[in-house]
Amino acid sequence: MPVLPATCFRGELADAWEAVHAGRIRAASQLLTATSARHTQGIRPLGPVETAELASLLVTCQLASGDLAEAARTAEALVPHLVEGGVATTIAHLGLGELTAARGDQEQALEHYLKAGASRGADDPSLVPWRTGAAVAMVATGRRREALDLAREEVARAEAAGAPHLLARSLRALATVDAGSSLVLLRRAHDAAASTPDQRLAAQIATDLGGLLLLSGRADEALGLLRSAESYAAGEDLWPLHSRVKRLLQRAGEQARPLARDTLALLTTAEQRVARLATTGLMNREIAEELQVSVKAVEWHLSRVYRKLGIPSRAALARTLHTSG
């Protein structure tokens, strides 16, 4: 959960903050890993706030990718910051709150979020949206009335600040707390997220909204939202989000597309050769001449590629293979 503006940092850490805030998790992970290595080697020393933010952002990326064990190891670097006070302590509590919530320990998560809110680093509520995490944890621990008050307060603060990203996040949390109004709230959250660069938040909200629409029998609208979320999650290799979308698509009788890291593994060597040539703009006859096979063999391989990857065309194939490297 990004805490401070990117302008509070410099170099690769600022770039990584921007990448996380835009939902470019793979790019952010690479930048954060490089920054961590430079810091460890003494090439790029970091202050307490920067080291806390570095670890917190890494935890966010690792949880988004489904690597809970690695996130737990990374989070160990946050523990020393819990006694420092100020912004570093706020960041540490938010990162640990995110980790413990992902582990299913909502009581511990709530404790971290409330401590983040009580810390001296939480003076600016527009920069430290601890209430969203706390509200969701409260619902999970049976404190729904308090959760509702806290979530509504965060929505009001986001509206007053005129911050679409915070508004989308807080409306999503309120939709979790206020089940009776969740469809309306998620539609508002979806609209707010469209005004931000955060693809991950937009995909999470689209998945939430798509799931509700499926339950209410609005499959056509739901599938559009789920396919957009699926495309993003598959491209970024975000296994937890992709798994949610996959389950919802299967419930609707639809086949899910694979994660980027799994794409090429689905294809035989011959199918990979044909697929790669097809993305270069060659026609089937030209591919056949290049590989010294029949045109019918090329057509057969391409039809299997499309079916395996769940895509309809050469254009979609080019996007899929480009994403998977």
Image: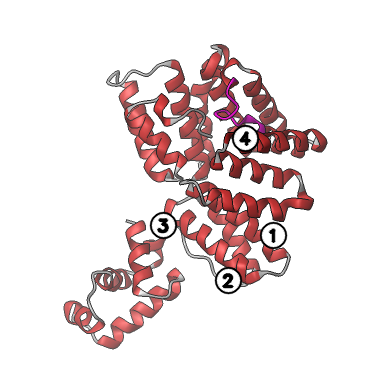
Choose the circle earlier in sequence order: 4 or 3.
4
Of the numbered discs 3 and 1, the one sitting upstream in the chain is: 1
Give the position of the C terminus as an image quadrant.
Answer: bottom left
Q: CA distance from mark 3 to mark 2?
A: 19 Å
Q: Is residue 321 above or below residue 8?
A: below
Residue type, label 4? Ala
Dot 2 crowding, Cα within 10 Å, few <14, some 14–19, many 20+: few
Q: CA–CA distance between discs 3 and 1?
A: 27 Å
Q: Is residue 104 visible?
A: no
**Residue 254, disc:** 2
Secondary structure under tag 3 reads helix
Residue type at mark 3: give it. Answer: Ala
* Mark 4 vs mark 3, CA separation in Å: 40 Å
Q: Which residue is mark 3?
A: 260
How far apart in space, not on screen, are marks 2 and 4 (Cα)? 41 Å
Q: Of circles 3 and 1, which is in front? A: 1
Q: How many marks?
A: 4
Tag 3–tag 2 contact (CB < 8 Å): no
Magenta segment, prevailing SS (helix, strand or loop): loop
Q: Nearer the viewer, mark 2 or mark 4?
A: 4
Residue 160, numbered label: 4
Q: Position of residue 319 (x, y in %)?
A: 35, 63
- Which residue shows up at 26% across the image and 86% down it? 295
Q: Are marks 3 and 1 in contact (CB under 8 Å)?
A: no
On residue 17, which mark appears?
A: none
Mark 2 or mark 3, which is nearer the start of the sequence? 2
Task: Determine which of the numbered discs, if any, sits on residue 212 in the image.
Answer: 1
**Boundaries of the magenta span:** 123-133
Of callouts 4 and 1, which one flags the residue occurring earlier in the amino acid sequence? 4
Q: Nearer the viewer, mark 4 or mark 3?
A: 4
Residue 180 position in % (x across, y down): 79, 52
For badge 2, the amino acid type reads Glu
